[in-house]
Amino acid sequence: MTDPKEIKKLSSIRQHILTQINKVAEGIKTRRSNVLEARRIMSKATGQIRDFDDVASLTTLVTEVFQQEQAYGEISKRLHHLKRLLNSPYFARIDFIEDGYDQVEEIYIGRHSLLDENTHTYHVYDWRAPISSLYYDYGVGRARFNIPAAIHGELPPVEGEIKLKRQYQIEKGELVYFFDSDLAVEDEILRLELSKSSDAKIKTIIHSIQKEQNAAIRSEATDVLVFGPAGSGKTSVGLHRLAYLLYRHRDILSSRKVRIFSPSPIFASYIEGIIPDLGEEDVETLDFIGLMEEYSPDKRLFHDQYQQIEYLQDTWEDSLKSSSSDLERPAFDKDTRRRWLDEKYSSGFITHLEEFIKDYAPHMEDVRFNQDILCHKDRLTALYADRTSAGNLTTKTARVMTYVNQRYDEYLQKNKRAVTDLFNAIHDENYSDGEIRRLYEDERSIVQADLRGRLMPSAKRLYERALAAWGKTQRLPMQFAREALRQERLYFEDALMLMYIDILTGRVPPEKNVKHILIDEAQDISIVQHRILRRLFPDSHFTVLADVNQALYPCINLHTQAELQKEYPRAKVIPLTTSYRSTYEISHFAASILAGEAQTVDLSAIYTRRGDEPVIMQSQSPAAATWDIIHKLPKEYNTVGILLSSVKEARRFYDQLLATRSASDKGFQADLLKLIASTNESFGQGLMVMALPYAKGLEFDAVICPEYGQAVFDGPFGKKMLYLTCTRALHSLYLIS
């Protein structure tokens, strides 16, 4: 659809953008010259430092260089935004009449704002601006939006009427089409977006954010818990929420104060770059392995969580050989590590560990020099006792050691002659004052080391004592737990607990510069991991994304919403009810897998985007059948996931694919065949043979499941694995039995 007025409007806005681009480009030249000159002056001054005044001058120059570089960075960022706007200045328009006014305001909405610096009016509003919420929340008719003062109750919301709602597709500065709608976001544009082939990177959804998603993105709650089924857009919502918060609270929040916790480095590669794409500086993305390596004071070696998952997978497969198929079968519990895993990740043990550290009281003895008592044990016990709720073993130890050192200093000062005589008599020497001081310090160091070891035992020693106390009540074999702690490379669960102890004892101090954390796939991390994050980042707010239907491992994952709500009691719970990712046929099939389970999927909440039914086929050679499927896939498909239950099975099937491919398979697509069986890999285009745990949070144009019908998908655990497999597919799903 074309319209002379719309074409003229687009041309006018693009001309404003070009004018600003030219102006900003000139400003960049000036800023760059300023930066280079400031650096030159600072470099010259660095070689001419003679006195304190020169140091003070250099400090001023360093500050100036920093300010000039910061200004240069800001103006460069603005130029980048303007160039992006030039290609597609806006994607929506709302004609809005505010109550009490007669004039209709035409509100254009785009990726970034465009302000006329002469008239101080907006040609285009940023999608995150308060007024832009009208586009996402309302159709034609009565509408309202909150300005910042209204959010805090200082002013009422702005109310009025939407007279026109228009959506645009603009590419390379050309108007491709537009249409009018009376819905919040027209189904046609949403269906068009969902029908596109997937990319190697997650895409922004600013054109098609739905009302329930917008509520989560713009929520003013400090902590937010977003629950939703697979494909409901949780990850996109979380990332867009970060971009919104960085825009909304620009005066107090910056990208340097924000963290994203992802399920794996593979997932991190999938979401890489989206925050800059939404107009903000990039945010640091971490996983727990990186966190543990960064904050471990002892630089412990440990197996990653995927070794733990593979272990659970292996014990699960072993248990399938017996008559029962449920995870709670006796055969499954006979393995000692599995029994300890259940206990270590339980809320009961975590509470026990917290109380054990809090109540820890070392055995105290009088501190003596020769026969004289310097510190009475009762006084040491009183000093070690908690005085504030923030007290920990580090602060208690510091308090006691400060007192002991003070008493040693006072004793030497008052008894210098007696101390000198004592050391001279013991060693039959006539020591100087300096030598007496050294001998006295040696005695003090021995006492300090012994005392500090009792006041602040190592994390391993505290953990072993806590395990022994718990194991006794639960009748668990302690020998295994002790031997596990003496391994050169610790089990992941033990490394986690030791890190938590380091935090509880104060050995790892809290990180107070981080102000907001996004946790994706939150159901996959354990109670202790959530508590680690909350204690390590005590000044942070949280956006937590979860789908309990994707929690695979009972002893590790959180399987109910109530469990997560307990960990974030102040959080506002926002449900996402509609699943958008897959076609209706795939979503319906996946939902039917969980029918009758404790957690189910609401079939009425599946977005209706029609496609082919999932294909269930039988084959004596799943590898050959997979190649046949690949040959028939549409050429526009960019990503194909061949998903297996475990790393072991993924490696085995990858080898089978290589062995069974024919000469015709050794073309372009076969060259893109990739095995993802470790966290060192990244998500990309092509054919990916992948273990299911690595596929969390990802999506593919087509998914092939070569293990369908096998025992690995039996029981509650197996059904969740199959559900997770199926819900990775956007357009096509193939199940080979």
Image (cartoon, rainbow, N blue to C red):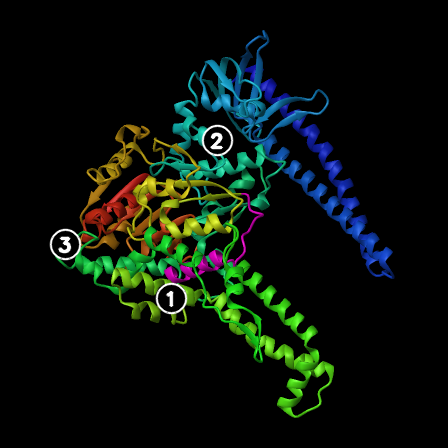
Sequence-wise first label, 3 or 2? 2
Mark 3, secondary structure of its residue = loop
The secondary element bearing badge 2 is classed as loop
Q: Does the magenta stretch include residue 502?
A: yes
User: Is residue 308 at all visible to an observer of this figure?
Assistant: yes
The residue pinned by badge 2 equals 219
Q: How far apart are marks 1 and 2 (CA)?
A: 44 Å
Q: Tell us which disc is closer to us: 1 or 2.
A: 1
Is residue 650 something one can see in this rendering?
no
Q: Residue 464 carries which label?
A: 1
Closer to the observer: label 1 or label 3?
A: 1
Instruction: State the image quarter where residue 372 is shown.
Output: bottom right
In the rendering, at what x and y percent does residue 545 appear? Answer: 41, 40
Disc 1 + disc 3, Cβ < 8 Å: no
Residue appearing at x 27%, y 35% in the figure: 601
Magenta-tinted stretch: 491-515
Q: Which residue lies furthest to the bottom in this view?
A: 428
At label 2, the amino acid type is Ser
Who is closer to the viewer here, 132 or 81? 132
Task: Name the image quarter holding residue 484.
Answer: bottom left
Image coordinates for residue 29, horizontal then vertical, percent: 76, 41
Q: What residue type is labelled 3?
A: Ser
Would you name the residue on which mark 3 appears? 324
> Is 208 located above or below residue 43 in the figure?
above
